[in-house]
Image (cartoon, rainbow, N blue to C red):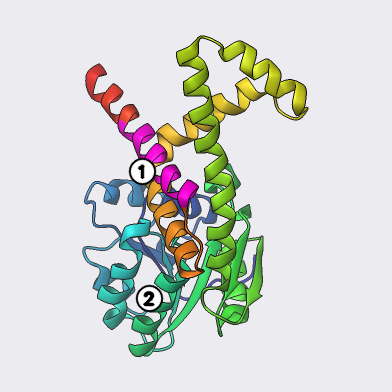
Amino acid sequence: MSAQPSKTALIGFGEAGSTFARAGGWGQAANAFDIAPQRRAVMEECGIAPAASAEEALKGAEVVLSLVTADSALKAAQDYAPFLAPGAIWCDMNSVAPDTKRAAAQAVEAAGARYVDVAVMAPVNPAALHVPLLLSGADAQETEVKLYELGFENARIAGQDVGRASSIKMIRSVMVKGLEALSSECAAAADEAGVFEEVMASLDASEKSLPWAQRIAYNRERMATHGERRAAEMEEAAKTLLDLGIEPVITRGTVVLQRRAAKSKKNERNEAA
């Protein structure tokens, strides 16, 4: 790994931020801010300096990794842009629609900083810094180098226009998350009818990769664990389709099922407590 930027800031320190920080070993060359105070302990565990505010985290930062929730991505860019150092690169790694990223870019660039659309194309666990990233924007090439210096090993440029990387991500998500929701809906009906094993056997006979029972168990776990975040992402995917003139019928349904799965899991945890 070559020399890293003089200072890196992470805005948002959930699963992605903590995973990247642990793998990168950035130490005191990076600090972080999260609106949830309990995340400070995780930052310290990862060797990252906790900041009391976004302004403190961003002071002098050359590279900023925005890793908030999808529904907070635009607001974070708009609220924190005034704290960015001139020429700083705001790497928007959130799963949001192209128009959302373009609006965020306007706020960042109006403040004298630079904006790059970064699409995270796979789960951050267990890939960590090996996770595939797509970059788009006028400063994508420089950002690719900066991310490499931080330890990211699988970034590539998708184009010069903000929104191109997120278009690939969002439209791909229609299929990936939609299949999860569709398989869950199918399994629910099979369970209710008492024909789960028969339906799974029929599906196995028509497709020879992973057995369907294993695939559905995996999809259900992913939806229960990450459904709230995925629902927010799929709302942005639906917006992407609407912006393209496509009615997101299945995508809207995916939002409902992802959120429902997360709520059911939360209720189970509350009952067990």
Instruction: Tell me the quadrant of the picture where the C terminus can be found.
Output: top left
Residue at 40% x, 63% y is 28
Q: Is residue 208 above or below residue 69?
A: above
Q: Is residue 240 visible?
A: yes
Q: Quadrant of the N terminus?
A: bottom right
Q: Which mark is residue 228?
A: 1
Region of the chain picked out in magenta, as a range? 249-263
Q: Are marks 2 and 1 in contact (CB under 8 Å)?
A: no
Residue 129: percent from the left, percent from the top? 58, 55
Q: Residue at x 49, y 13 (%)?
A: 193
Viewer-side residue, 254 vs 248: 248
Q: Farthest residue in the top direction?
A: 194
Q: Position of residue 29 (x, y in %)?
A: 43, 67
Q: Earlier in the sequence, mark 2 or mark 1?
A: 2
Mark 1: which amino acid? Answer: Glu
Residue highlighted by disc 2: 104
Q: Rate crowding at label 1 as few (under 14), some (14 to 19) or many (20 or more) other CA atoms within 10 Å.
A: many
Q: CA distance from mark 2 to mark 1?
A: 22 Å
Residue 267 falls in which quadrant of the image? top left
Q: Position of residue 94 (x, y in %)?
A: 44, 61
Please provide percent x and percent y for residue 227: 40, 40
Mark 2, other Cα within 10 Å: few <14 / some 14–19 / many ≥20: many
- Considering the numbered disc 2 on the image, is that residue within a helix, a strand or a loop? helix
Q: Is residue 259 magenta?
A: yes
